[in-house]
Amino acid sequence: MAAAQRLCSIISDVFDGRILSSVQCLTCDTVSTTRETFQDLSLPIPSRDHLAVLHAAQGSSAAVVPGAHTRGTLEPQQGWLSWILGRMFSWVFGWLWGPGVALQDCLSAFFSADELKGDNMYSCDKCCKLRNGIKYSRVLQLPEVLCIHLKRFRHEVMFSSKISSYVSFPLEGLDMAPFLHTECPRTATSYDLMAVICHHGTAGFGHYTTYALNNLNDQWYEFDDQYVTSVEPQVVQNCEAYVLFYRKSSEEMLNRRTRTYELMERSRSEPCLLSFFISKQWVNRFNTFADPGPIDNGDFLCIHGGVQPAKAHIAEELCVRLSQSVWEYLHDSFGGGPACTHLYTCPTCTSEREALERRRKAELDTFIALNREFQQSQDSPGVVYAVSMAWFKQWEAFVRRKDTEAPGPIDNWCICAAPRVRVPSNRACVLAVIMAPSRRPCGSSCRAATEGDRR
């Protein structure tokens, strides 16, 4: 069976990011890495002591978040008396409730190195022992929409509690560049807030409300059950955020869209000698994403450059016709392809598809005939072979046209590990009778005796 391909969907295109987690052994300095896909980041809210450590590591007494506004701050143009009162208020507030926590602090806490020692030592494969280690992570690929979950709920054995600390966050310009791995492309690392989910209440009960930005009129709205109310940005910024949704922003991408629209307008008034076809899916990414990635026409073109036979009847609905100047600009800017100037059904794929249909029919007809002969036979079969139910379902999906890929050789390793075994009656398998030596199954065959075949 061919290796499973990565499933693609609107959800994965919008929310999927990739992160690299690394653990370094402090004895042999060996580093083990794990690449993972994430759709949200669950960030801790650092305590006062942890915050002091983070600020000391950053070389500053407070985290600076571009575009963030903190409640209770005073304008620098105020007089000396207001400045003194403001400093006194900040000192008292910090002494009672601790220093202000910013979203950037939560990100720094999440991506900071953790010591693995004591009861949480690292099992080093090279040392073959438990060793002290350091665990850290970095972002390999930023998602188009970054979902951030703040860990406001703490669940203990006997009780649960909620962290109601205010966490300041920027409406615009959240910079993820400090947390990127060197392999991560740095084309667009800035994010703008698009929605916030708030929790009102305690750990035992509460109520959820949402603030969301309407891009059409650039207005924030509060959604509280059936009530929708327009609010000012300051109201959003002062809320007790629980889940935040940030959308990637790029000034360069806005300029490229403007340039593309200008070329399209110009091409309408000029004769077009050569047209190119481009995927509608990618065009949608171009119109909405800050980083659409390279042009990908693979949703309607095959590897030979022609239209996939299964999509030949809807090919024109899957693509957009562009002038040569627009195509060249997009291809120079984003790369990818393949280039397509003519929609034709691929003859190679058509031949392969027809051969696959003939194989489906031949295998299904042969199976039905042999199975009917086995059911009608009065004699006990000489040899009975067991076939894995998992493999049989793959084959059945293939011959029933539910799957386009053939299942590959028979794989019986999940039901037998020896040349001769006893198969329990509750084991998922299919018994097939091979009437002639030439029909002997390929792969790992399993000559089995069922529970009913007692000696």
Image (cartoon, helix red, strand yellow):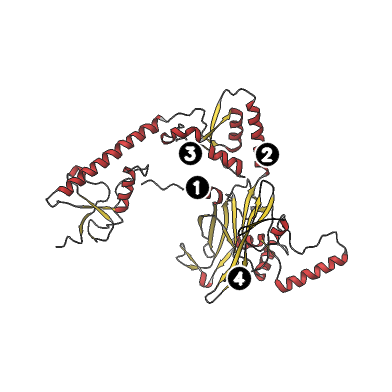
* Residue pointed to by mark 3: 299
Q: Which one is closest to the eye, mark 1 or mark 4?
A: 4
Q: Which one is closest to the eye, mark 1 or mark 2?
A: 1
Residue 392 position, x and y percent, is 30, 50
Q: Of all residues shown, which one is farthest toward the left?
A: 379
Q: Are marks 1 and 4 in contact (CB under 8 Å)?
A: no
Q: Amino acid at mark 2?
A: Asn
Q: Which one is closest to the eye, mark 4 or mark 2?
A: 4
Q: Answer above or below: position of 396 versus 19.
A: above
Whichever of callouts 1 and 4 sits on the residue coming sooner in the sequence is: 1
Q: How dense is the environment of label 4, judged by Cα within 10 Å: few (below 14), some, or many (20 and up)?
A: some
Q: Are marks 2 and 3 in contact (CB under 8 Å)?
A: no
Residue 69 position, x and y percent, is 73, 59
Q: Amino acid at mark 3?
A: Asp
- Side of 351 relative to 339 (left or right): left
Q: Inspect this view and state whether residue 360 appears.
A: yes
Q: Are marks 4 and 2 in contact (CB under 8 Å)?
A: no
Q: In the image, which disc is placed on residue 202? A: 4
- Side of 194 relative to 80 (left or right): left
* Residue pointed to by mark 1: 9
* Marks 4 and 3, how far apart at CA: 48 Å
